[in-house]
Each structure stands twice: as structure tokens, then as C-alpha cells.
Image (cartoon, coloured by chain):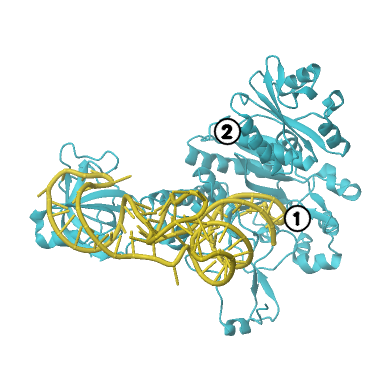
Amino acid sequence: MLKRTHNCGELTAKQVGETVILNGWVDAYRDFGGLVFIDLRDRYGITQVVFEPDQGEALMNAARELRSEFCLGVKGVVAKRLAGKENPKLATGEVEVRVTELSVFNKSATPPFDIQAGDANEEVRLKYRYLDLRRPELQQVFVMRHTMNQVMRKSLSDQGFLEFETPILGRSTPEGARDFLVPSRLHKGHFYALPQSPQLYKQILMMSGMDRYFQIARCFRDEDLRANRQPEFTQLDVEMSFVQDEDIMTAMEPLVANLAKEFTGSAPTLPLPRIDYKDAMERYGVDRPDLRFGVEIHDLADIAPKTTFQVIQIALSNGGRVRGLCAPGAGAKYSRKDLDGLTAYVGEFGAKGLIWLKVEDEGFAGPTAKFFPAEVQAEMKERFGAKTGDMIFAVAGPEAVTHQALSNLRIRLGAELELYDPKSYHYSWVVRFPLLHWDAEEKRYVAEHHPFTMPLPEDLPLLETDPSKVRAQAYDLVINGEECGGGTIRCHDPAIQARIFELLGLTPEQAQEKFGFLLSALSFGAPPHGGIALGVDRLVMLFAGLTNIRDCIAFPKTARGYDLMTGAPGEVDFKQLRELYVRVVE
RNA sequence: GGGGACGUAGCUCAACUGGUUAGAGCACCGGCCUGUCACGCCGGAGGUUGCGGGUUCGAGCCCCGUCGUCCUCGCCA
């Protein structure tokens, strides 16, 4: 076998004159009859190799047979290219390899799509994922992903964290996402569940005195997919003992800074900003604000009495809200048609309409400007810091609608008006989430994060009087408006944990049945503890500038949960089902 | 479960208002070519228009159903 002495990305003028062997795939071939050029590709780069008649007819004939994606070994002499024939687009473009010996390891069928172009339909790319993954663009993403894993391991290991593995076959627990179930052969009618996260195991490890845990853990949730959501995904899972919420954030920040440094070239100043959940919702309408730009949302309820605008009066009298934001420089940017488009856009989030006001020297302009007297206009200009040429957008309606409509509008305006550098990164913590919210349909409280979250100490009394007002010791890591991780301090007090189970509608018997092991472990001197999990796939997506999580997962699934390469999920033999006591019903 | 976009040659796309034999570029096959790097030139082959039904003298185009891909609401992180 012609074993490589060099890879396809490393030859330069330094090796001129050396005999080398390269292994790789035919990226392109250019056949001149009397002269054949091959671009040989591996994951390190591309090197041009050339076949010339002086090496004999047999070699030339063999070279003329080469086609795209043939897998080759070539032996030859590194030569400086003819003067003026260098290719500045290639790292190896100064030189070429004059081939003396060729070994075709394997021919290739004609590729089903143009691997170099990379513009094929995703369906076909996923079916032939092994070919898609030959593309340098994709290979770079997985190099990055590898590096990320290394940075995470090193950062945490340097801080004294121990890497653990926890079971994939666990038990189904109530709350959270739908479980993937695995039927037990040994126990008729019983099922394992794949972990939604290693949550309880890592808490138990704290109770075992492991003190600082981490795992790059695969998690499974049987819910519908999205551009940034797959049914199996990877978390950097972390847990620490003897800590409060600030300790977790402080412990994670060096890691975040290391990732930022590695992938963006610059690390944020620490500590990262903390924003109260409540402030985030008020100022940005969302719990994961994109803070690469300003444009805060302001309330307009107080000006309502000074206008004659029915829409506003009605929203307020129905217990809703009127809120708006100021888009700098939007006045000249948006045509009437564009504004109709923005109105339709907020409509997607339930807004009945969009109030838009152009700020001009003479006052507001727009179809609803007449409802705002001069005095109110001055007040609004001041509140929004609006200048001539800006636009004020406002939405009236139920609180959730104003939040959704304005937060999404804000993101859209930020991009369209180029209010930030798309290559920039902003990191922040959103803290003090609500512990619970009331689910009207199920007629019970539902955990905002998960059922093991510790309330803020000062809010503990509210657990008895007004549970939905209880704030949690919870924190999310937000980067560029993406939720990249979240965690909580856990309940290490069995009594508080029992009270929360009660609020969640679990009887003591049910709590015992589902979480007996946890309650038991809590009763044996459990340390105060807490942790966090970062979404590895999302971090790769973010740092690689991708808009879709499939491109940073080697073998992803489609929106319907198929693996188009293997055909999973597939049918199984009746015999397999019988062993598992499982029957398919129509 | 709901909404939207899409599905035509191996790939990327075109085909007027429903009208002759469904076209182009790339890829593929054959031939020519000694300095290309998106090589070039000549020639050729390649189609169940996702699938099933319907309307029509006539359907890639209209209607119904179905499957698949993407985006999204619900759900979920």
C-alpha cells in the first residue's frame, strides 16, 4: 500500500525535490490527453498532482481513468510549479506532485450530487451523509466541535471537576418532555426511559460526595423538531456541591470565556452581566434577549388617558398592555409596503395590529399619528430617546402578545436596520426565573425549569401563599439571543422538596413512587448543591455561524425524526416484539 | 395536531393563460487536447414531472388524497 508521508494540506516549497506519498480523494480532474491534473483532497487540504507522459503510457492511461471521489495513493516528487502557474487559492498552491506511481484504493460510483458545489437539496445530502461530510465546510464544523469538547474538558478538569458517565437506560419520571421508552425484555410491561438529561444522577453524585461533576451527555426528548432542536442532543452537564447560584455562574464563566477566546478571538469581560428575568421581560419581551443592540421596550399605559385611541383603551381595560419600541433610522428605510409586512409579522404572534409612527421635525407621521396630541408626542419622544428619522412601533393587547410581538419585532428590526455587527457576540446571564406557573388546562402548577429547583430564600413563604410569585435560584446563559444553557440550585431540603411536589399535584405516595430514591438520598445528609447544562450543539451552531443544528451534528434527523441515511426508525420482526411483550396496535 | 413553502433528468433549475416531441447548465458516456486549477472543443445518452385518484378533447400546470423535505405555532431545551 502507498502509505502517506504527508497530508494534502502541508506541502510547500520547503519539500521541493522530496519524494512523497499522498492519500486522498479526487476533488477534481483536468484531463488534457497528454497531461492530467488531479486535485487530491483529504481533511487537511488539497494538493495538485500531475501526470506527465515521461512516466510511461501505462501510468497516463491509468490517470485518464480517474474520476471524482476515487480514493487514491500517489507517489511522486514535489516540484515547484512553473513560473506564473501558482494557485494562490490553495495553501499548497506553490507546488505540485509529479506522480511516478498511482494506486487506486477504490473507484467511486458517480456521486449523486456535486460535493464541491455543496448546493444540493438537504434531503439528498442527508441520504448520502458520508459524501456530504467530505465537504471541507462541514469538516471544519466538526473540527470545531472536537475543539469545543477539548476546551470544555480541560477548563472543567483544571477546576477540579470529575467526568462521569451516567445510565442511558433510566426510569421515566413525570414532568418535562415526553420520554423515549425502551421496553424491558426481562420485565413484562415495564419500560426504561432514555434520559432527558442526567439530572437526578448528577444530584445523587453530589450526595455521594463527588463535589464537582461534569459530563458531555447525550440527552433524549421525544418532542417535535425545529431548526435548533433535535430529539437527541448533547449537553455539557455540570453539578457542584456547597454552592449558591453565584458560585455556579462564577465557575462557568472561565469556560465561557475560553470558548469565546478560542472561537471568536476575544473573550468577554467577566463577570458577565446578570439580568433579572423580570427586567428581561419588561425591557426586551423575552427571557433570552439579544443584547448585541439596545432598542428597549417601554410601557405606554400612562399616556393612554391622553389619547383618544380606542385600540389602546380597549387593550388596557381588558387587562392588557400597551408597549412599544423605537427603531433608529427606520423612517427612511421602510416603505408603506414594508410597514404592512411588519404588521403582518407581528400578526403571527397574535397582535391585532401594529401602531407605527414616523418621527419627523413637525411631529409624528402615520395613519394613527392623529391620536397622539403634541404633548404626548413630546413625552413619547423623550421616553424612547427618539430622534427625527426614527420610528416608534407599538402594540396593544394581552401581555403575552405584546411580549412576543415586540420581542420578535425587535430582533427583526435589529437585523434589518443593521443595528449590530452580525459577527459580534454578547454573553449574559438571565437570573431569578419564576419557580412555577399555573397550568389552567391541567389545573396544577408546573415547574418552570424542573421540579428539583430551590426557591430564593426570601420567597420561601410565598410557597404557601402565592406559589406563582416564587422566584427560583435559576439562571440561563444567553448568547446573542439564544438560550445556550440553564441551571438551578437544587432543593436539598426534603421538606421544601416535598412541598414543591405537592404543588405540582403529586401525592406523597406518587412522589415516593417516582422519586423515592431522591427523597431517600436527601435524607442522608445531602449537601447544598446546584448545577447547569450547556447546549453543546447550539454552542457549535452559534460559534460556527450556522442557522441550523443539523449542520453541526454528524448524523442528524429530519423534522419528522427520520435518519435518511439508515432509514431509522424502522420496523422490527414480530419475534423481537414478542420477546418484549409489545404489540403494534392500529 | 395546526399553518406556510416546496417536490420536473444524477444535481441545480426553466417550461406563458391548461395546448406540438418537457428544456438549460453541471455531472455522466464517446472523441480531441501538454499547463490546467469552474480547463476547453465536438458528439451522445439520460424523464412514471414524488405517488394515487379526479376534472378536461388535452394536465408538469387545476381539484382531492397521500408521502417526503424545510420553516413555524402548539410542545420542548
In the image, farthest residue toward the right: A465
Q: Which residue is mark 2?
A: A416
Q: Quadrant of the N terminus of chain A?
A: bottom left
In the image, farthest residue toward the top: A362
- Shade of chain A as shown in the rendered figure: cyan
Give the amino acid type for the residue marked by disc 2 in the picture: Glu
Quarter location, residue A408:
top right
Q: Residues within 10 Å of mark 1 (few under 14, many from 20)?
A: many
Give the letter of the chain under mark 1: A
**Residue A452: which numbered mark, if any?**
1
Measuring from the top left, give residue A103's x and y in whole percent.
21, 63
Q: Is residue A277 visible?
A: no
The residue at the point 74 percent across, 52 percent down is A490
Along the viewing direction, whichever of A194 and A135 lies nearer the viewer: A135
Q: Residues within 10 Å of mark 2 (few under 14, many from 20)?
A: few
Position above or below: A76 against A359: below
